[in-house]
Image (cartoon, rainbow, N blue to C red):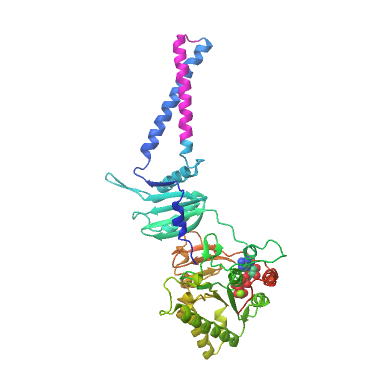
Amino acid sequence: MGKDRTWKRKRKKHRIKGTILLRTDGSKATAAKQIILAILLSGILLPLLIIFPVFRGNLTVAPENVRRLADMFVTGLCLLEVFVTVRILLSKHSPIKWLAVRKKLVLFTRLFIKPKISATLYHSVRWRYWLEDKKTVIDLYPNGLVEDTAGLGRKLSEYMGEELLKYEECNGKACYLFGDSPKRYDGMLLMGEGISKLTGRYEPKMSYAPIPIYDNVVWDFNSEALHILLIAPSGAGKTRLLTYLAGMAMKRGHKAYVVDAKNSVFGRVFRHSGVQVATNTEEIICLLTSLVDEMEERYSKYFAADRAEMDEDLKTLGLKEHFLFFDEILSVLGSAGKKERAEIERLLGQLALKGRAAGFPVVITAQKLSATDLPKSITEQCQTRFILGGLVSEETFHQATGAYKKDIAAAYKGGVGKGYAVTPKSGGLTYIETPLLPRNLRDCIILLKELRDRGTPYGEGR
Ligand SMILES: Nc1ncnc2c1ncn2[C@@H]1O[C@H](COP(=O)(O)OP(=O)(O)OP(=O)(O)O)[C@@H](O)[C@H]1O
Ligand SMILES: [Mg+2]
């Protein structure tokens, strides 16, 4: 999955940036503003106090002095208007968002960080911030003044009134991304993309383009982190995500293979499209064996050290990926005999180990992850991790992602079809919502069948 460090790289373009390092506690600036306001008000009120009695006839002043006082009043009024406009522009309610963010950070710093004064030195945190695509990116350099940068992110989110979309700690700074949650993708729309009518012939093209998942989280099956481990409790959306990923893999013109030990609607969806579906231990071992054989053959033909051209890969060779979608691995391993279990683990381990170079991505789902249930030879190769669901224990979360729920600066937001993605590339946890699929997967079957019948390589199981 080639996420997403890009949110930091891309943001370099077209950004208005700013840095804040407070040097005073703001009391002098406040005093200066009050003095300016007092001068301006007296510049307005004083002429008024004199001009009014003149107009009433209670006071006599030379006409040129009256004119001078009137000029003074108008000038004072104009300056007051400029002063108020500047104050509004620089306030936290500024219509210019960049300036509003600046002011909020200044006020927030004074409120929560409690900068310290020692002798003439003023200790404060440093902020860098910029706006990009309706999102606000803020880096905090704590300068040793903040212990819990995740907690501070939560407070900052409340103070700014914006949702905290991402939090990451790196190189001595904490990075926050604020904005509105991106919309969830429509899985059916993405799978059916390019098919404008249900008549006529659809001409599919093989593509290695990453598969979109949520916002800028994608599954880049050409990267080192191509194998996915998807952990979620029952009913949290494993099979739905697997269905989408398999549909998209086929949409890209590659081959898919499915393991559905529950013999559920998931297997039925793909069997209808002609995909090879294994449901019992015997079929699973048979499928895995043939995949490993094919992988070995391809590997020795194209990628073995003595044969491989330096710059050749699947794309340049025009080879199809062979995706394996393995649902509920724990129930498969749990119900298999000792010998079969060892064989399944060995074959999966082979696919996980060599699958990257030869183009055999594996997606495995399980309800939990523990070293005793799932061999490390498989899990360690699955560098892309998804975790979905609201009721995920702290232990499972940590085993799957290497992080703790408390590391998520925003409150934990897992739910049905909602959770987190983590990859070695992207570093931190990224919140995701899986692409929406219809409640009834019959529509999915219709779409995949329709495409197959119209001459796509859909369902070309093998
Ligand atoms: N992406 C999604 N789009 C729409 N509905 C979803 C999605 N993901 C989950 N759901 C809802 O949650 C329900 C359970 O999803 P799913 O069957 O994928 O979960 P699961 O983790 O595979 O559960 P189980 O452990 O029972 O197999 C679905 O019937 C559906 O109503
Ligand atoms: Mg399921």
How many marks the image carries: the answer is: 0
What range of the chain is rendered magenta? 58-86
Question: Most extreme residue toward the right, as rendered?
Answer: 199
Q: Nearer the viewer, residue 308 or 7?
A: 308
Classified by dominant secondary structure, the portion drawn in magenta counts as helix
> Magenta span has 282?
no
Where does the C terminus fall, quadrant-wise?
A: bottom right
What's the residue at 45%, 60% (across, down)? 5
- Residue 83 visible in the shown view: yes
Q: Is residue 182 above or below residue 307?
A: above
Question: x%, y% of residue 76?
Answer: 45, 24
Q: Quadrant of ligand 1?
A: bottom right
- Residue 373 visible in the shown view: no
Q: Is residue 162 above or below residue 223?
A: above
Question: x%, y% of residue 304?
Answer: 43, 80
Q: Is residue 371 above or below residue 159?
A: below
What's the residue at 41%, 30% (across, down)? 36
- Drawn side of residue 262 relative to residue 368, left or right: right
- Drawn side of residue 379 relative to residue 35, left or right: right
Q: Quadrant of residue 31 in the image?
A: top left
Q: Is residue 164 above or below residue 107?
A: below
> Magenta span has 65?
yes
Q: Nearer the viewer, residue 265 or 200?
A: 200
Question: x%, y% of residue 327?
Answer: 58, 77
What's the residue at 51%, 60% (across, down)? 411
Q: Nearer the viewer, residue 187 or 74?
A: 187
Question: x%, y% of residue 37?
Answer: 43, 30
